[in-house]
Amino acid sequence: MDIRIAGTVEDSIVDGPGLRFVVFVQGCPHHCEGCHNPETHDFSAGKLTTTDALYEMCMENPLCSGVTFSGGEPFCQPEALYELGSRFKAAGKHLMCYSGWTFEELLKKSGREEYVGKLLGILDVLVDGRFDISKRSLSLLFRGSSNQRLIDVPASLSKGEAVELPE
């Protein structure tokens, strides 16, 4: 399946726990002031690739323990990321995703957009919320501003409300 990306990082230790493969998707509607990746905002920029190519690239590294979807806004390409993420989960990879939408906003969207719910359903961790430059902190684990949360997605879906991971 085709997917538009800004790029990948093959050996990240800052985008989630362990050694990770990171897919930076192209396109974001949020345009947060001070965004770390403003070059990912334009939906027509970046490059087209396939989920097969991304899967193969990640699986070449036997030390990779997890995959992170970042951006851009991953939930703007939920079908392709669900397909790709499902393959990673089947291979035993930890799956993390960043989104400018909150967990609650994504739950509402999932009622209208099938693949938003499906993608949410396979995630282990969600970093949610728009980056807020006035709440920026370099001391936070895996996120840039204090309004963003580290969400335990399986526990949250089970409980029906956001369950934050302890730091």
Image: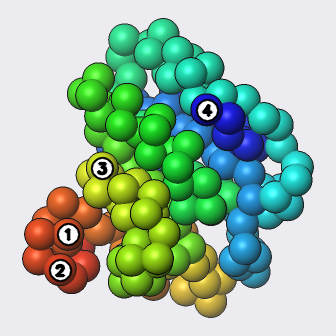
Q: Amino acid at mark 4?
A: Met
Pointer 2 residue: 160
Q: Amino acid at mark 2?
A: Gly
Report whether residue 91 is seen.
Answer: yes
Between circles 4 and 3, the one closer to the viewer is 4
State which tag comes first along the sequence, 4 or 1. Answer: 4
Left or right of 93 in this view: 26: right
Cβ atoms at labels 1 and 2 below 8 Å apart: yes
Image quadrant where residue 13 sits = top left
Pointer 4 residue: 1
Image height check: is 92 above or below 71? above
Binning the other alpha carbons within 10 Å of mark 1 as few (below 14), some (14 to 19) or many (20 upward) gives some
Q: Position of residue 38 (x, y in %)?
A: 80, 63
Between circles 2 and 4, the one closer to the viewer is 4
Label 3 and label 2: CA atoms lie apart by 15 Å
Binning the other alpha carbons within 10 Å of mark 4 as few (below 14), some (14 to 19) or many (20 upward) gives few
State which tag comes first along the sequence, 3 or 1. Answer: 3
Report whether residue 127 is seen.
Answer: no
Image quadrant where residue 103 sits = bottom left
Please state, as top left, top right, bottom left or bottom right, where the N terminus lies in the image.
top right
Q: Amino acid at mark 3?
A: Ile
Left or right of 44 in this view: 122: left
Image quadrant where residue 147 sits = bottom left
Pointer 3 residue: 122
Label 1 and label 2: CA atoms lie apart by 5 Å
